[in-house]
Amino acid sequence: MKINNTVLFIIKRLLKMLFTIWVVTTIIFFLIRLMPSNPVDRYVEEQMVQYGLSAEEARAKASFLFSMDLDKSMLEQYITYLGQVIRLDFGDSLLSPGVPVMAIIAERLPWTLFTVGFGLLLSFIIGISAGAILAYRRDKWYEPVVSGIASFLSSIPDFLIAIFLLILFGVVAWGGGNPILPIELLRGNYSMDVTPGFNFAFIKDAIMHGFLPIMTYTVSQVGIWVLLMKGSTISTLSADYVTLAKVRGIKPRRILSAYVGRNALLPISTEFAMRLGFIIGGSLIIEQLFVYQGIGLELLKATSGQDYPLMQGIFLIMTIAIVISSFLAEIFYAVLDPRIKAKEGN
Amino acid sequence: MKNEKLLDIQNLSVSFKTKRGFLKAVNNASLTIHENESVALIGESGCGKTTLSTSIVDILPLGAMITDGKILYKDVDEKVLNLLELKKSKLRTLLWSKIAMMFQASQSSFNPVKKIRMDFIDTVKAHKPRMSEREIIKRSEELLKMVMLDANLVLNSYPHELSGGMKQRALLALSLLLEPKLIILDEPTTALDLLTQEKIVVLLNELKQQYGFSYLFITHDLSIVSELADVVVTMYAGRIIEKSPVKEFFKNTKHPYSLGLIKAIPKLSLDHTELFSIPGSPPDLVEDTIGCPFAPRCDRRLNRCSLEMPNMIPADNPHHEYACWNPNNGD
């Protein structure tokens, strides 16, 4: 009975996730195909006007590029498209012909996941600890100071923080010497002279190159975790079961981990997965600023070069990433809090 | 035979820091609980009953502070400890093993993300780290059966899977787990239906006989007081105004406020128009009052009442004390 409940819960969430991905896939298809002056029509027009191709030829070229058979009915095209999406085949890039979109994404996405994930994790750990400490010490003088800094940080847009860090670490020559980081050497994901793989030189180099983006994500996200955790911990601290745990003579460390910590983290764990998705979407500007070769920079290139298959692929991958992370968050939440499953069962 | 003093609260004062000034929630309160004695604390809401009892177990909310007084506890080796000056780590070992407490409306007293068994195991482990989980579960099952619960079901449930009455009884079992000397019960029967209330009261009386517990219980229900208490203590506006053995209290009530509380019990024979209520409401505890705080609401008020606060004086029965200038003498 209990196991059934859990399985049912996971299956329900899984179906919901697949449904969301299907809806987004469909929207992307119709956006590209059906809108007035949609990319396909514009491409055909462009080929006809600029290169003097016949309508037939232009359409044939477009079908090849977008991997759509424009002569078939809309429904047939749609079904073919869904089949391609399931195989994760988005056709070839327009800007670098012959290179599959998936290959580009597979090349870029890990770097964005690395910087965003690292930054978010770091900000989460710092913010959660600071927030919990502030909640315990909320009668101390530094509580409003730290909370003030946290809400200040959480309200600055991340690209401003990026620019500030860039100037702080890479431009200003402190004490007349060199800037702290040689930023012109830190463009890209890693230096030319290291071999990618599991070796110390490469890992160190990758971290050096990713340092500023990671710092940016950390600084821009840390404030929100401090505030969320502080609020959540304060309300948990005044809960009856925490007070009673104290009266029961349970050791303070045990109370912190089993009674306060776990319950205070509950509402925040979902937020973590949501943020992951948002920041991957927002990595566009940060990666451009630091010339970091991630998915955001690639999306920017695809947009300015009107590389529709690539854009389509990136959008879809981003959506899938967000949907999967919120799926994982829900599962995680249910594991942490038995009440979620119970509600679902009724 | 007179039992020995177990807990002796002397001149306790507790203040809350508020924006308007200090709110004196408990004002110069003295109270003694003997071994195997059950003390009932009565009075309207906001009279300091809960503040008084929570200050014993050191869980006063942020902003509250004890400004004066002592709470003396006599430990097993005849040593008298002042709970207010005890080191936190020493106090922790006394809590629950010697003094347990059940909260008012204990609906959220269990950790919502753990099964009930964990609360039982955690409690014992904090005091007797060597006791095995099997022993703990065995003892817990015995206690849960005693409070008329299906032990296996309760231990393997999450708090949200139990009804309010079940949780309250499970909490009672939890408070007996380490066989404390004193159990503080803050409105132990409020969330229960009348039949379960009756069962709990009977059970509490049995347990007292069997284990020699002392109770300090807060209640608004005077019928429970008559069934369960040995001594009744009335509080008003943060002060203790009457202390009396239970029979004497109902037979020979001295303080007009205590009398008001007794009169306010609805009786089946009366229709509701005759229901008695004390006019007015308790005073603002931030302002300093000269004289008896009950004077503005009192129907036996004298001139002296609003000028001078009466001290506790003994009645004919030396165990019966009250603080009133013009007590009720059955006239």
Image (cartoon, coloured by chain):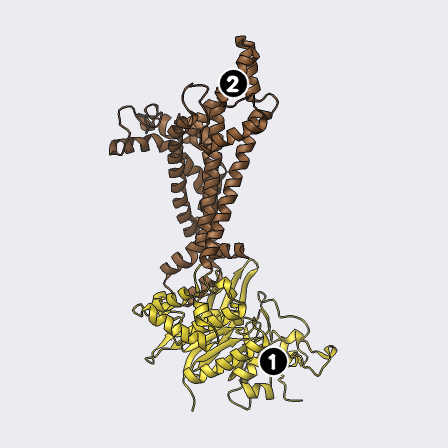
Chain colours: A brown, B yellow
Q: Residue furthest top?
A: A52
The three-letter code of the residue at mark 1 reads Ser
Q: Position of residue A167 (x, y in %)?
A: 40, 28
User: Taking A230 as reference, is B293 above or below it?
Assistant: below
Q: Residues within 10 Å of mark 2 (few under 14, many from 20)?
A: many
Label 2 is found on which chain of the structure?
A
Residue A178 position within the rendered picture, expressed as x and y whole percent measured from the top left = 31, 25
* Tags 1 and 2 on a common chain: no
In this rendering, is residue A328 above or below B90?
above
Which residue is found at the position 52% from the left and 78% from the top? B200
* Residue B329 visible in rendering: yes
Q: Which residue occupies the extreme left position in the image?
A: A200
- Kind of residue at badge 2: Ala
- Name the residue beneath numbered marker 2: A62
Q: Quadrant of the C terminus of chain A?
A: bottom right
Gap between marks 1 and 2 measured at Cα? 93 Å
Depth check: give the residue in front, B207 or B231: B207
Q: Which residue is mark 1?
A: B258
Which residue is at the front of the view, B116 or B278? Answer: B116
